[in-house]
């Protein structure tokens, strides 16, 4: 890829890892930070900070920088529509913005992609820029799970796909042969905090030796945005929740800070498994 690349950078490790990996490959990215969502490392790159509703300004910056390809990376807080803070470019696009804002995450992300594509920008996935972000099939860290843990993986995997069809979340936890938590608007870390609280309050009696976290892509999800991801924080949170390991959908999930995540999993005695897709 020799086209100018812009990274729309939200919160979390993905935008940073993507930006520095692109630089190492000799492709210097342009960073677009979102007001109140931006982290300090962005200042190490050619960057601009724009507020929600400054779509006209965003597209002007991309054109000025001769950007052809755009990656949407990192978490963002779903914005509230405030017409007073919108520039003319956003106001002109308001009907289509409202249409995709009122739907679930898939609707929102698909709408954002169309917004860029209609203006001539190509949206590409983080995994297209840095392919090694994607999880592989098989054991990634730790020992092979016991049969009871694999049974829990299957249960949680099935739950994730049902969740995904409803455009609710990408993760579930199974313990003792049943699904005991699913991801909602709080995200994976929030869900794992709930599981930890269940243990603290005695709601979970199973000792957790075979309990698992599973993350999968939603059915029919656009692969260029919002792939399920795990990283060091995931490992810490699943250990705090008393779980045995995590399974991710192979080839459709991202492992952030791979070396650190794998080493941490080994140190904590939990597994990371790349599970083939079942959709």
Image (cartoon, rainbow, N blue to C red):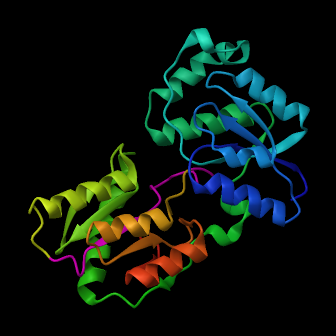
The reply to whether the magenta stretch includes residue 201 is no
Q: Is residue 157 visible?
A: no
Q: Nearer the viewer, residue 264 or 149?
A: 264
Q: Quadrant of residue 158?
A: bottom left
For the N terminus, the image quarter is bottom right
Point 9% across, 71% down: residue: 205
Q: Nearer the viewer, residue 38 or 68?
A: 38
For the C terminus, the image quarter is bottom left
Give coordinates of residue 74: x percent, y percent. 58, 48
In the picture shown, does residue 101 fall above or below 3? above
Q: Nearer the viewer, residue 222 or 263?
A: 263
> For this view, does 258 lie left or right of residue 68?
left
Give coordinates of residue 20: x percent, y percent. 75, 60
In the picture shown, does residue 131 fall above or below 228? below
Point 52% across, 35% down: residue: 108
Give coordinates of residue 72: x percent, y percent. 65, 46
Name the magenta segment's main secondary structure: loop
Give coordinates of residue 258: x percent, y percent. 59, 73
Point 31% across, 54% down: residue: 191
The reply to whether the magenta stretch includes residue 222 is yes
> For this view, does 208 lie left or right of residue 184?
left
Magenta-tinted stretch: 207-225
Q: Quadrant of residue 92?
A: top right
């Amino acid at each position: 890829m020799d086209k100018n690349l812009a990274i729309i950078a939200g919160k979390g490790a993905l935008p940073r890892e993507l930006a520095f990996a692109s630089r190492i490959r000799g492709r210097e990215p342009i960073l677009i930070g979102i007001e109140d969502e931006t982290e300090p490392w962005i200042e190490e790159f050619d960057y601009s900070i724009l507020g929600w509703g400054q779509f006209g300004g965003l597209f002007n910056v991309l054109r000025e920088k001769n950007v052809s390809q755009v990656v949407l990376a990192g978490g963002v807080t779903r914005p509230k529509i405030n017409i007073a803070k919108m520039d003319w470019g956003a106001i002109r696009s308001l009907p289509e913005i409202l249409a995709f804002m009122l739907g679930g995450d898939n609707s929102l992300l698909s709408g954002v992609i169309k917004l860029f594509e209609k203006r001539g920008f190509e949206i590409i996935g983080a995994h297209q820029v840095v392919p090694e972000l994607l999880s592989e099939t098989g054991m990634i860290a730790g020992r092979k799970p016991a049969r009871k843990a694999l049974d829990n993986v299957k249960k949680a995997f099935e739950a994730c796909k049902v969740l995904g069809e409803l455009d609710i979340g990408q993760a579930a936890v199974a313990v003792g042969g049943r699904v005991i938590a699913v991801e909602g608007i709080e995200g994976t870390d929030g869900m794992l905090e709930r599981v930890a609280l269940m243990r603290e309050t005695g709601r979970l009696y199973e000792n957790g030796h075979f309990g698992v976290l599973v993350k999968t892509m939603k059915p029919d999800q656009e692969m260029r945005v919002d792939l399920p991801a795990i990283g060091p924080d995931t490992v810490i949170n699943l250990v705090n929740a008393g779980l045995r390991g995590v399974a991710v959908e192979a080839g459709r999930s991202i492992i952030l800070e791979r070396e650190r995540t794998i080493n941490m999993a080994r140190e904590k005695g939990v597994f990371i498994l790349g599970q083939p897709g079942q959709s």
